[in-house]
Image (spheres, helix red, strand yellow):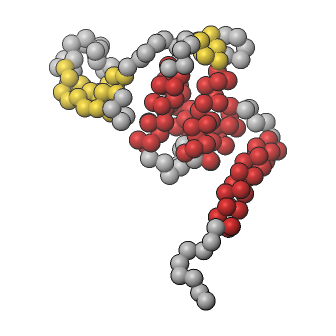
Amino acid sequence: MRCPFCGNVDTQVKDSRPAEDHVAIRRRRFCPACGGRFTTYERVQLRDLVVIKSNGRREDFDRDKLERSVRISMQKRPVESERVDQMISGIVRRLESMGETDIPSKQIGEIVMEALARIDTVAYVRFASVYKNFQAADDFDKFVSELRPQAKAAEDEVAAAPPEGPASE
């Protein structure tokens, strides 16, 4: 592995351990030439995926790009970093196991939105605002109002449940 500081190709691994719920290996490395320390991650890649953009353009799938967009939507949300890592790894595994190497960006966006909706609704709305290209506040209002019937149904279930505790006579 080439040193990112001085370019030396002879770096040493000082420590290796499982990362991201055992789907990656985290390696701490040391460069004997400049003394620099850095971390690398090693992951299994089942196949090379190609993203087909809405305009027809094709580009290689970039896990880091997916991770950046998800982390932006999750900023300042009370969700553990490990849970986000697991979600991203799950999305990538799902994409790789679909059997196709060419995947429309729309399909990737839908899978990400589905995963975010299960973890954090605010992050889900943030991601949707970029993915669906919201142009005005009305777009947010319409999208959130579509979420409310689901939340209302959950609230109604809770309200209809019998109260817990001893019954009074």
Which residue lies at the image location 62% right of the left edge and 72% below the top edge?
A: 162
Note whether residue 84 is visible. Answer: yes
The tally of labels here is 0
Q: Quadrant of residue 30?
A: top left
Against 55, residue 140 (above or below) is below
In this view, the residue in front, 135 or 146, is: 146
In the rendered image of this protein, does residue 31 appear above or below residue 159?
above
The residue drawn where x is 57% and y is 44% is 118
Image quadrant for the C terminus? bottom right
In the orientation shown, which residue stands out farthest toward the bottom? 169
Place residue 16 in its image quadrant: top left
**Residue 111 appears at what percent x and percent y?**
60, 30
Instruction: Please state the horizontal and vertical placement of residue 122, each as a whole percent of the image.
Output: 62, 48
Taking the spot 50% from the left edge, 20% from the top edge, the residue there is: 97
- Residue 61 image position (x, y, % from top left): 53, 17
Which one is in front, 5 or 87?
87
Q: Is residue 50 left or right of 19 when viewed as pictured?
A: right
In the image, what residue occupies the spot 79% across and 36% down? 135
Q: Residue furthest right?
A: 138
Q: As displayed, is residue 122 above or below residue 56?
A: below
Q: Left or right: where does residue 169 sit relative to residue 23?
A: right
Q: Residue furthest front?
A: 169
Residue 39 shows in this picture: no
Coordinates of residue 67 in the picture (x, y in percent)? 50, 30
Q: Identify the image quadrant of the N terminus.
A: top left
Q: Nearer the viewer, residue 48 or 62?
A: 48
